[in-house]
Structures are given as C-alpha cells and as structure tokens.
Amino acid sequence: NNQYIASNSNSSRFSGSESQLDWQLSRADRLRLTYAYVHAQASNRLDQRLTASNSGSAGWLRQWGQGWSSALFYYGDSALNGYRFERIDTRLAKRLALGKANLELAGTLQQRLDHQPSTFADNRYDSRHVVYFSAELEF
C-alpha cells in the first residue's frame, strides 16, 4: 500500500543553515545568490523526502527605466522527493502610475531544465514550461 495517510502521531525535526548575498551592482542592476542546507528527520519517510538537503538560487534583477523591469533567476536543489530540480524563471514587468496608485503588469516564463517528475514518478504533469501573467495594484 503506497497510499499516504496523514496522522498527528508523526514528527519532524529540521536543522541546517542558510546564506544570502544581495549585491546592488549599480543603480539599475542587482545580483542575488542564496544557498541552504537542511537536514530533515521525520518519523514518516515520505515526509522526509519533501525537503531537499541542498538548494540554491542565483538571480539578476534590472530596472530599465520608464517603469520597465526584468528578472532572471536560476533555482536548483539536490533531491526534492528524490529527484533533482532545476528551473529558470524570466520575468518582465511594466509599472504604471494611476493617480496616487500604481499598477504593475507582469509576465513570467518558468522553464524546467531537468527531466524529472514534479513530485512523484507517477505524476502525469509533463510540461517543462509555464507562462503566467499578473497584475498588482498598489494604493
């Protein structure tokens, strides 16, 4: 029986370290690097697999002027659910002033670089890329 049954009798313990570097290269450019090591102990082995031991990201953010901005990020981890995970995200946004409010319209493309399942081997979701759009109203 490989069915997961949630239970309040299970326990988990996490320990590890995390580092971040956020560097303003110029007025327009910013570089961001992160790394995390997590040691997970769980009474249920399925719970333990939900945490990657090593993970990190690298990103470049840029303000192009006149309300335009972009971001390019790489995400990777060693073994989420026993599988390697690698993805690149690209985001382009335009900020518009609406009186005292601001509207930001953005589009994001997420591209998987690995050929691993998203969660489990029998997962039927097989798209390597996802596109989505967002609108943020700030007032």
Image (tube, rainbow, N blue to C red):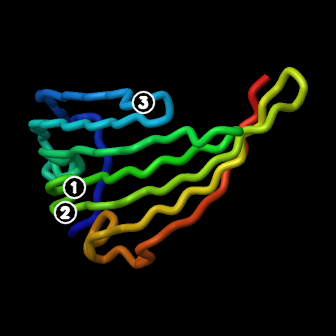
Toward which corner of the image does residue 78 lie, by quadrant?
bottom left
Is disc 2 surrounded by few (<14), some (14 to 19) or many (20+) residues within 10 Å? Answer: some
Which numbered disc, 2 or 3, marks the residue that appears first in the sequence?
3
Question: What is the three-letter code of the residue carrying label 3?
Answer: Ser
Question: What is the three-letter code of the residue carrying label 1?
Answer: Leu
Label at residue 60 = none
Residue at x-position 15% and y-position 61%: 82
Question: What is the three-letter code of the residue carrying label 2?
Answer: Arg
Q: Nearer the viewer, residue 83 or 40?
A: 83
Toward which corner of the image does residue 123 lie, by quadrant?
bottom left
Residue occupied by mark 3: 26
Image side of residue 107 versus residue 110, left or right:
right
Q: Secondary structure at mark 3?
A: loop
Q: Nearer the viewer, mark 1 or mark 2?
A: 2
Q: Is residue 27 above or below residue 122?
A: above
Label at residue 84 = 2
Q: Nearer the viewer, residue 80 or 96?
A: 96
Residue occupied by mark 1: 80
Whole-Å distance between the Cαs marked 3 and 1?
Answer: 35 Å
Whole-Å distance between the Cαs marked 2 and 3?
Answer: 34 Å
Q: Quadrant of the C terminus?
A: top right
Q: Quadrant of the N terminus?
A: bottom left
Are discs 1 and 2 less than 8 Å apart at CB? yes
Q: Is residue 86 above or below residue 103?
A: below
